Amino acid sequence: MMTVRAFMACGAMLLASSAVAQTATHTGAHNPAIKNNDAAHVAAPASGANSFSQDQARGRLTKAGYRSVSALTKDKDGVWRGMATRGGKKVHVGLDYKGNVTAR
């Protein structure tokens, strides 16, 4: 009798866990930290492990309206930093792990 109850309890847990797994959805880019593909402009970048490659960072900055993106390097906080032009002016740009863009 005890074995039957234990078996039924395990079966119920398996069914419940599979139902939860089926309701979870994964949308968006390959980077789960990013909510969408649009680069948001923020006052300060977020520190964190940045999974963007240098080419991906350059692409996001270009998509955000910056041209001639150069000298991109990842700093100790995981932020890609470099130089770019926008509206004919040279600016310092940054891209954090969330895909947020900063300029100054």
Image (tube, rainbow, N blue to C red):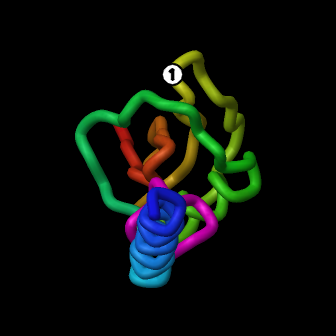
As drawn, 83 above or below 60? above
Q: Is residue 33 magenta?
A: yes
- Residue shown at 29% from the left, 34% from the top: 44
Q: Quadrant of the C terminus?
A: top left
Q: Is residue 100 visible?
A: yes
View extreme (front): residue: 1
Q: Amino acid at mark 1?
A: Asp
Left or right: residue 101 compared with residue 79: left
- Image coordinates of residue 2 in percent, x first then y, are 45, 57
Overall secondary structure of the magenta section: loop
Whether residue 80 appears in magenta in the rendering, the answer is: no
**Residue linked to disc 1:** 77
Residue range in magenta is 28-37
Decide: is 43 above or below 30. Answer: above
Q: Which residue lies at the image location 59% right of the left edge and 22% below the top edge? A: 75
Identify which residue, 82 or 100, lies in the foreground.
100
Q: Identify the residue shown where x is 48% and y is 31%.
A: 48
Q: Quadrant of residue 83 in the image? A: top right
Task: Examine the rendering and report whether any part of residue 21 can be seen.
Answer: no
Label 1: element kind: loop
Please tell me which residue is depicted at 74% across the width and 46% down the height of the picture. Answer: 54
In the displayed structure, would residue 88 be above or below residue 14? above
Q: Would you call the spot at circle 1 few (<14 residues within 10 Å), some (14-19), or many (20 or more)?
A: some
Q: Position of residue 41 (x, y in %)?
A: 30, 54
**Foreground pick, 53 / 64:** 53
| Res 40 → quadrant | bottom left
